[in-house]
Amino acid sequence: MAARTKRQSGQAVKKAPARRPADALNSALTAHESVYRTLRERILIGGFEPGMAVTLRGLADTLGVSVMPVRDAVRRLIAERALTM
């Protein structure tokens, strides 16, 4: 997609290419999906001991993300019965 230009004060100003709504949605889901897949993989390969206590903040710090994607991933994994609270 070509960049659009807008005239401002007699000079052409380049604007960034318009983002499609799907692009915005995919980038918003990337961190959440990445955290989910990482935690799920670690569970499946035995990266966590059965009964091991973990915190959302601790997982977030380890993965280098905020707590929100970790919280969402943990909820998904609980729903799938891969984790228990």
Image (tube, grey):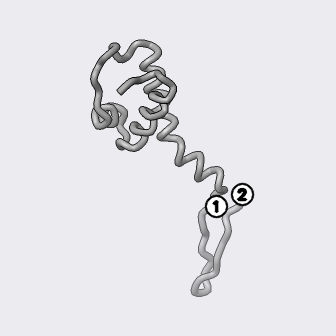
Of labels 2 and 1, earlier in sequence is: 2
Q: Residue 2 appears at what percent x and percent y? A: 71, 61
- The residue that mark 2 highlights is 1
Looking at the image, residue 53 lies above or below residue 31: above
At 39% from the left and 38% from the top, the residue drawn is 71
Looking at the picture, tell me which residue is in the foreground, 3 or 64. 64
Q: Marks 2 and 1, Cα distance to the nearest angstrom?
A: 7 Å
Figure quadrant of the N terminus: bottom right
Figure quadrant of the C terminus: top left
At 59% from the left and 50% from the top, the residue drawn is 25
Name the disc covering residue 17, or none: 1
Q: Residue furthest right?
A: 1
Name the disc covering residue 65, or none: none
Q: Residues within 10 Å of mark 1 (few under 14, many from 20)?
A: few
Looking at the image, residue 50 lies above or below residue 7: above
At 65% from the left and 51% from the top, the residue drawn is 22
Q: Residue 51 appears at what percent x and percent y? A: 31, 16
Tag 2: residue type? Answer: Met
Query: Disc 2, disc 1: CB below 8 Å?
Result: yes
User: Would you identify the image quadrant in which residue 83 lies?
Assistant: top left
